Image (cartoon, rainbow, N blue to C red):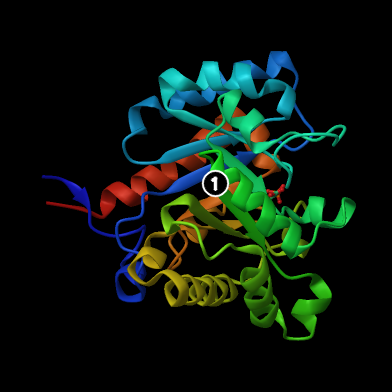
Amino acid sequence: MLRFALGLNAGDQQQGSAGIRPLIAGNWKMNGISASLANVREIGMKTEPIADAVDVIVFPPATLLESAAAVGLPYRIAIGGQDCSSETDGAFTGELSAEMLSDAGATFALLGHSERRRRHCETDENIRQKAIRAIDANLKAVICVGESLDEKAAGDTLTVLSKQILHAVPRTVNSSDLVIAYEPVWAIGTGRRPEDQEISEAHAHIRGQMEAVWGEGGRQIPILYGGSVDSKNAKTILRLPNVNGLLIGAASLDAAHFSAICSDAAGLASANLSI
Ligand code: PEP
């Protein structure tokens, strides 16, 4: 029987994230109207032949969740909400509960994105509560962590990641309901990204934290890199140890670029197929 022997690279075998299928996620942020559903369809048509080798998620704006889920379904494109409330229901004007996302066809929730942490003053504790709500509503929680430029300059990257993980990632949930996205704040939308070695160090550190809590299950939690990924640098990043996929902002708005990155991920995964 064919199975994935490795993550995306031999380094993962040594460092322990064997068997994780690459996951490529597009965060559309506050972009997209009904005409943009054509992008979901185009991504679907382009990634259909590789749907066994890569998991594709699109995080559209909330107004498009239900229709994007319907368009994406035949192509196995998963849809996620870009946030969810830390409450289940009630007098929270403008908020969307995890159950509402799920009801609209979402299967993932993106939580703790730095834009929400900054603009909406979200704390790690809020994010943990949201993750619990999301998982209770049968969504997988994609929890974002990452250091600011000042924290990086102070040499505090790994300390910041430890602290965010400790407080934002719920420990009482199943590891199979979690995805971690390492997104250095200073790399989002700037065209700048960490050195390969720095990404490897951050991902190894996150992997260690996951294993410390979930043991073997922690080795299977996908750890995505996000921050100025494009179709030129995606392959290089995907080859790094413990990088199990990508969270992509701007480049995900272009269906051709996004699909090309999905194909790169599938190609790298297939190169590691073993009997
Ligand atoms: C993001 O918003 O999660 C992101 C990674 O954005 P970009 O790819 O544009 O840097």
Q: Who's the residue at 52% across and 54% down the image?
A: 179
Q: Residue 196, located in which quarter of the rendered image?
A: bottom right
Q: Amino acid at mark 1?
A: Ile
User: Residue 35's spot in the image, x, y percent?
Assistant: 70, 13
User: Residue 242's spot in the image, x, y percent?
Assistant: 44, 66
Relative to 68, is 52 on the left or the right?
Answer: left
- The N terminus lies in quadrant: top left
| Farthest residue, direction bottom | 155
Residue 231 makes an appearance in the image: no
Relative to 179, is 120 on the left or the right?
Answer: right
Q: Residue 100, located in which quarter of the rendered image?
A: top right
User: Residue 29's spot in the image, x, y percent?
Assistant: 75, 38
Query: 25 or 189, which is in the foreground?
Result: 25
User: Residue 236's spot in the image, x, y percent?
Assistant: 49, 59
| Farthest residue, direction front | 90
Q: Residues within 10 Å of mark 1 (few under 14, many from 20)?
A: many
Q: Is residue 257 above or below residue 23?
A: above
Q: Mark 1 falls on what kind of element?
A: helix
Is label 1's Cβ within 8 Å of ligand 1?
Answer: no
Q: Who's the residue at 71% across and 14% down the image?
A: 34
Relative to 76, is 185 on the left or the right?
Answer: right
User: Looking at the image, how many numbered discs can be counted on the residues?
Assistant: 1
Query: 230 or 157, which is in the foreground?
Result: 157
Residue 146 makes an appearance in the image: yes
Circle 1 is placed at which residue position?
A: 135
Q: Who's the residue at 61% across and 42% down the image?
A: 109
Q: Is residue 261 above or below residue 209?
A: above
Q: Who's the residue at 35% across and 33% down the image?
A: 50
Q: Residue 80, located in which quarter of the rendered image?
A: top right
